Image: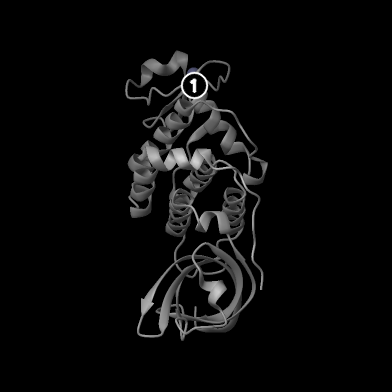
Amino acid sequence: MSLIRDAEFRGLVMYRRDYRERDLLVQVLTDKYAAKMFMVRGAKKPRFKMQTAILPFTAASYVGQINPNGLSYLTTTKRTTLLQQISSDLVLQAYASYLLTLTAAAFDENTAMGRYFDLLETTLTKMNEGTDPQLLTNLVEIKLLGLFGVAPHLQDCVICHRRDLPLDYSETYGGLLCQNHWPLDSHRLHAQPKSVALMQGLARIMPEQLGKIDLQPRTKRELQRILDNIYQDQVGLQLKSKKYLDEMTRLPDWSQSNSNKPSESASTEND
Ligand SMILES: [Zn+2]
């Protein structure tokens, strides 16, 4: 791939940091080139015209110069939407940062993300509108597994294909085992059948179909444990953003203030 001038692409701003006196480096997850680092000249000057397009947790359409190796440049932006609720809530920020870095990790730089970009954008939009952030995150975690070369068998029992018995996850068998076949793997995850059913449900739907579900905290915790095991042992991924998310969601104060927060409608900012 050679340098592309006037490239048009969509992007989700991951993070930014200082670069020289007046400039910023902005990491953007783009639909056509995956994660790219942009140098934005004059971004720290007051009244910089692209100010709203380079805030973290912003979705926008951009025009810029894409350099396959090294820094790229943003020229202008077309449509900008700040995910307001996410950017004003530390727990949601932690979920969104993890989802952005996890998805970025699944794609080599300069490759198109196709429908996975839409998946992520829809997921973050739903999260911004108040849908359960953990379930949305788990849904994406399940959908990305195939890109990491792990495709767990989740439809029914790996061995006999029964689905009418309680199911548990086996890392050894790379999928579900029915109760009759539990003796095959003493190291199966011993997860609640309810959590396994929840994982199967999330594997079948898209984020826009996820409504409000009443779940016991334990069912959600167990689902997270299953996915954490798969990502640690089978994918072998260790992201700083995941560690941070785990710390944030373990703090009782934060989860408390988050669950007590009234759900507010999405607020968007256009320019
Ligand atoms: Zn079986």
Describe residue 204's horizontal placement relative to residue 146 as left or right.
Answer: right
Which quarter of the rendered picture does the C terminus lie within? bottom right
Compared with 124, 177 (above or below) is above
Q: Nearer the viewer, residue 199 or 219?
A: 219
Compared with 149, 112 (above or below) is below
Q: Residues within 10 Å of mark 1 (few under 14, many from 20)?
A: some
Q: Seen from this angle, which residue lies furthest top?
A: 180
Q: Nearer the viewer, residue 209 or 189?
A: 209
- In the image, residue 250 lies at what x, y percent? 36, 39
Res. 183 image quadrant: top left
Residue type at the position of mark 1: Pro
Residue visible at 44% across and 43% down? 150
Numbered label tally:
1
Compared with 269, 103 (above or below) is above
- In the image, residue 169 lies at what x, y percent? 43, 27
Task: State the residue position of label 1.
Answer: 193
Residue visible at 56% across and 67% down? 11
- In the image, residue 67 lies at what x, y percent? 47, 80
Residue 157 seen: no
Ligand 1 within 8 Å of the CB at mark 1: no
Residue visible at 56% across and 81% down? 64
Q: Nearer the viewer, residue 191 or 137?
A: 137
- In the image, residue 113 lies at what x, y percent? 55, 61
Describe residue 217's horizontal placement relative to residue 263 as left or right.
Answer: left
Residue visible at 53% across and 15% down? 165
Q: Nearer the viewer, residue 190 or 165?
A: 190
Where disc 1 sits, the SS reads helix
Residue 218 seen: yes
